[in-house]
Every structure is written in structure tokens, then in C-alpha cells.
Image (spheres, helix red, strand yellow):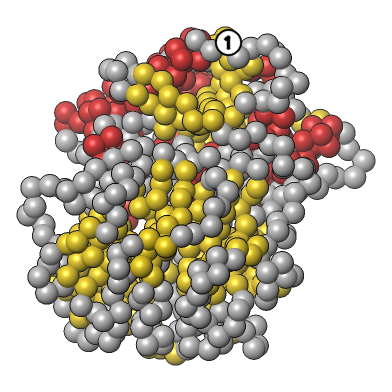
Amino acid sequence: MRRLLLVVILIVGAVVVLPAQTDSVQPPENLGVDGVPQIPAAVAETAGRYGNYRTAVLQDWNPERRQMLIATRFGDTAQLHLVNKPGGARTQLTFFADSVAGGRFHPHGGDYIVFVKDAGGGEWYQLYRYDIATRDITLLTDGKSRNILGVWSSGGERLAYMSTRRTGKDTDLWVINPAEPKSDRLLVKLEGGGWEPLDWSPDDMKILLQEGISINETYLWLVDTATGEKTALTPRDAKEKIAYGNAKFSKDGKGIYVTTDKDSEFLRLAYLDLASKQTKVLTGNIPWDVTKFDLSQDGKMIPFVANEDGVGKLHLLDTASGKERAVPKLPVGLIDDIRWHRNGRELGLVLDSARAQADCYSLDVATGKVERWTTSESAVNTSDFPEAELVHWKSFDGKMISGFLYRPPAKFTGKRPVLIDIHGGPEAQWHPSFLGRLNYFLNEKGIAVIFPNVRGSTGYGKTSSLLDNGFLREDTYKDINALFDWIATRADLDPERVAVMGGSYGGHMTLAVSTFYSERIRCSIDVVGISNLVTFLEHTEAYRRDLRRVEYGDERDPKMRQFLERIAPMNNIEKIRKPMFVIAGKNDPRVPVSESEQIVGALKKQGTPVWYLMAKDEGHGFKKKQNQDFQFYAEILFLDKFLLN
């Protein structure tokens, strides 16, 4: 979900190339443009540097060397690179038109890498093997189905992964030795799209498998790697719906470490004994979600990240004593992709803060030494970018809602116009992180930006995450209406100049707010948004349809269908009276492009001003630099015209 949020914040790392001798920015040939006026070249010349920056995301450690595998962008899309030492040069390995979604070293020797890539944003991912010595690339999967990179066996020769190869919608568990592609075999047939392999037992006789029903309901299974027989590890008849997050076998194989909200509002790190099925909570003193963790090679230490009101805090747990070890203070923001090196003392992680884009670091747990491995470039000095301010407001029913406010520099006086940016998911949360191009609107246009975490967001307990499900959907729209009221109480914010935007589910929220609270905004920007939850559920890819019904409601139920049709922005089109900018990808498997096309067509018909961008080579949000560029410049023009004037 965090990577989806990057779509909402106008996406990172782009440099526009302007045709010679022209006074306007030309759209890429795969980008359909409707209603967007010509963009003056001066817009790109002024704002372009805010898109001229990179990020780096940790993928893996080389098992034999002190070397990181990272993903970063030097061309049009993010590709795999190697970094040989802290601050070392980045050596590019892959060179595709589409982004590489992830990569892992072969645990024995690091002689090859298995990576994942799709085509055109369709998310029909394929697994590939990259041989370090020869640089040859071998396709490991069928080239057609959706395949999800899983986990290496403890022995290091086999890889468990998920594939829709059998039916096109069910994600089955497969096992392959990537060095021998013909070894690929279906281990167990499964129903539904919410399955994921988490770990192998130390003796490689079992695979720990997760079954996801919803953000609040998951189950754990053990799969026999010889026969494919699966055995339930967590009860299905429990009165309480329980979520289990990441899980790993203990080094003796007698139990698993797992994050779970069993008997709690929050995901806590716990130890589950396989013989007794008893659970021991390890982080009961932390009243926040434990979002991620890793286990050291010797099983003696667990680094984990707690999400404390949207801010990531790193902890280090000694498994023998159950006590925490001291860790150095890190910048306030988001901590992601924590991963142990096999040397047993270095932890790799990614840090992302308001004043620094995502970069890779290492922490020596023995000495406390923190080293920066990547220093991603930026054309703009980020050291003075505004920090996020945690704010709260009371909603219609008395519930307190929180979010993060970024204020423009002090040079902008008087009441400032406001851009409300709503995250996707909805099972997600906005964290105080690097804003990318949105910093242009803050620093150059004086627009304040607010990221609300409305009810239904994660990070505030499972009860809160359920408050927008099914028939409660309208309550989360009302949280934004309450935010409008809060803005009106602020001496520094202008309630008469407010725009709303969002991507994916945030796009749906944008459409809903534009529908039911049209009089409170100047304009809106909908990025790959849902215009009708019924048509969305009927047309989203089959492998994810049932998972979404748990959140939004089952459109096959007559009462639910009637409710969803009643609140659909598409069915209340006459209420949308303010200008709207719609952005979509033709190959989007999550929110079909038809959701955007139908709202654009209806707005045109009734005469509401609407701009439309549709990329033929993108899916759920723009990933290609040239498309991101044009989207950004068009958004500048749109807000200049409809918010600031």
C-alpha cells in the first residue's frame, strides 16, 4: 500500500525532455490527452527540478559479500543495481522499459538473482533469473499468468512462489529451483487470491503459508513440501477475527515469530509454539502496530518497526531475554525494507523522511554504527523542506481523526490555499515522508498540503480499521467534511480555496467528496479512482475480487448493491459541479480504466469542466518518467487555473 501512495503524491523521480525549438511541453505518444490545454515550456523549466531526484529501495544483501542489491532509477523506470560499499557507485544490472518490481539473491553464493517484472503496468508479473557472471536473463514462469515472488528454502536452492497459472484467478503455491527451470512444480492447489508463502521450516519439510481474507482476518497453514498437504495452524472457528502478518520459523523449528492482533487492537510481535499452539506476546508494552520484522541468522535478535501514530520507530529484541537492546536514534519518518545480512551483525534498512527521499542504510547492531549506502541525488536542496505536523480534528460522531499538515514557507503570508491528498487502500496510512513533487506546490505556490488518515485507515487499531466497511462507507466521506470545518477554524488556512485529490481508493474518496461536498471545494484531481463500487467489483481482476468485497461489501447482495449504487459518484453525477482532472492507465488490473472513462464521459455530457489523461502503457498509476512528467505539469496548470485564481 505505501507504494500506491507514491502515485497519489505525483510519483517520484522524473526528468522531462522537451522537443527542440518549441514553446510547449509535448505529451508522450502513448499518453492520450483530452481537455488539457497546451502546457507552456516555462512550466517545465520552472517546476522540472522538483521532479529531478532519485530514490533507492533495498532489495537484498549479497549472501557472500558486503554488497547491496537496490532498485533505483537512472533512465525511464526503476531497475536493479548493485552497491559494493557505503557511498559506493551504483552498477545497473537490468535495462527494461518497465520497472523491475523486486529481486532476491540466490542464498548460496549469490551467483544469480531472481527478479520480478510485468509489462505495461498490467501486474501480470513474471519471474526471471539474472546470472551475475554472464548477465544472461532467463524467464522462469509461463509469460502469461500472475506470479508473485516468494521465499527461499532454508537450504537455499528452492523458491516458493504464488501463481495464477492454473485458473487465471486462484493463486496456487509453486516451488522451483531457479537454476533448473524444468524443476518448476505445482505444490498445492488453492482457492482465491489472498495466499502468500512466508517461510520454510529449518529442515525444509514445511512451508508456512498465509491465507488473507481481509486486513482483519488471516489464517496460517503448514504445507508439507513433499506431498503438498496443508494443515491449519490457526483456528478458523474463533469468535474473534484475527489478523496474522509476517511470520518466520524460530531457528529450532519449534515455533514461529509472528505479528498478530489476537486479543489486541494492534498487531503485536508474538511467539507461537507449534506443539501447544500457545501464543506468547513479546511487545505487549507497545500500544501500536508492529509493521515489520526480521530474524537474525542465529535466531538471537529480532529487529522490528512499530508504527507510532504514523511514525516508524526501530526496535531490537533479544529473543533469549525478551528485552530490547539500544538502537541509535534515526530520522523521524518511515522505516522500510529491514533485512539482515548473513554476517549476523548488519541490518539493512530504508529511511524516508520529509527532508530526505528514500535511501539505503546499514546498522551494525554490535557497535551501533549507522552507514549510508546510497545518497540519491536531487536538483533541489531538500534540507529546508517543511516537516510534517500531526494534527487532529473531531468528526461528525465525535471520533477524533488525525492527519499530517505540511505548511508552506513563511514567505507566504495570509490564509493559504489547501490541497487535501487522500491515501489509497483504504487499508493503508499516510506516514510523514518525502513529498517529492508536491514540495513544488508548497515552496513555489504557497499551497498547504494535508494528508488525512480517515476512519478505515490502518495503524489506529482494528476497530478503527473496520469503521468504513460495507454500509459504513459514507462515514469516511464525512471525515473529510469535518476536515473542511477544521480548516475553517485555522487562521493560516483558506477554507474558500480547497482542492482534493487522491489515488486508487483515494481517487474514489476524491470523487465522493467532489460529489457530496462540491460546494466546499474549488476543484479535484482523481488518479485511477473508483467511480462506482459496483462496476468496480464486477470488473476488477478476478484474483482480487473477493478480497475487495470484504472491504466494500458484496455487490451480489441486493441490499448492498442498492446502497453502493445510491452512493456512487457515477450515479450522482449532477452533484459534481467543480472542475475535475482524471488520470488513468489503460492496463490497470485493480481499478479498470472504464471507471475513469465513465465519469469523464458523464461530466462532459453535463458540461462540468474535466481534463483527462490516459496512458496506454501504464497500469495502476504512472511509473514511466515521461508520463509522470506530463502528469505533473498538467496538474500544475490545473491547480493554477482552478485553485489559485
What residue is drawn where x is 88% and y is 38%?
Answer: 22
What element does badge 1 sit on? loop
Rendered location of residue 309, percent (x, y): 41, 39
Q: In which quarter of the image is the C terminus?
A: top right
Q: On the image, which quarter does residue 303 sit in?
A: bottom left
Using the image, determine if residue 397 lies above or below residue 96.
Answer: above
What residue is drawn where x is 50% and y is 75%?
Answer: 345
Rendered location of residue 301, percent (x, y): 38, 70
| Closest to the observer, 567 or 194 | 194
What residue is drawn where x is 61% and y is 35%?
Answer: 387
Rendered location of residue 492, percent (x, y): 60, 14
Q: Is residue 405 left or right of residue 203?
A: right
The reply to whether residue 10 is in sight is no
Q: Report which residue position mark 1 lands on.
A: 491
What residue is drawn where x is 20% and y is 31%?
Answer: 560
Q: On the image, which quarter does residue 84 sit in?
A: bottom right
**Amino acid, disc 1:** Ala
| Closest to the observer, 391 or 494 | 391
Using the image, determine if residue 281 lies above or below residue 506.
Answer: below
